[in-house]
Image (tube, rainbow, N blue to C red):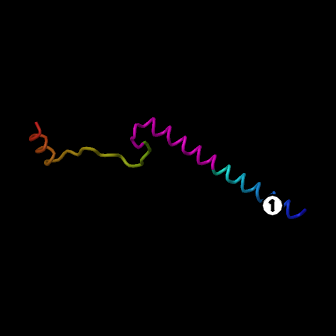
């Protein structure tokens, strides 16, 4: 009698654990898919650094003169 209770408890714990892991994985997959669909493949996030795309210099001036 005691062993059957333990076996039942073990099997129940395994099933509940597997269900929780599966549900968590499914929820994570759904949330990442929706983020990817909204961003069109562009990484979206917050960075503490300011992105500098252009800094005026003599080399850039020469490049722009030749490009025009």
Would you say the magenta stretch is mainly helix, strand or loop? Answer: helix
Magenta segment boundaries in residue numbering: 22-43
Question: Considering depth in this image, is 59 or 6 the residue closer to the camera?
Answer: 6
Where residue 24 sits: x, y (%)? Answer: 62, 48
* Quarter occupied by the N terminus: bottom right
Q: Quadrant of residue 56?
A: top left
Where residue 46 sits: x, y (%)? Answer: 44, 45
Q: Is residue 5 above or below residue 28?
A: below
Residue at point 10%, 36% (across, down): 68
Residue at point 72%, 51% (across, down): 16
Looking at the image, residue 62 sits to the left or right of residue 43; the answer is left
Q: Which residue is mark 1?
A: 7
Where residue 39 sits: x, y (%)? Answer: 42, 37
Residue at point 41%, 43% (across, down): 43
Residue at point 54%, 41% (across, down): 31
Where residue 21 sits: x, y (%)? Answer: 64, 51
């Amino acid at each position: 009698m005691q062993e059957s209770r333990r076996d039942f408890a073990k099997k129940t714990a395994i099933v509940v654990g597997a269900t929780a892991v599966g549900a968590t994985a499914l929820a994570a997959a759904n949330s990442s898919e929706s983020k990817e669909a909204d961003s069109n493949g562009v990484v979206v996030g917050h960075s503490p650094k300011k992105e500098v795309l252009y800094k005026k210099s003599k080399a850039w001036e020469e490049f722009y003169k030749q490009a025009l």
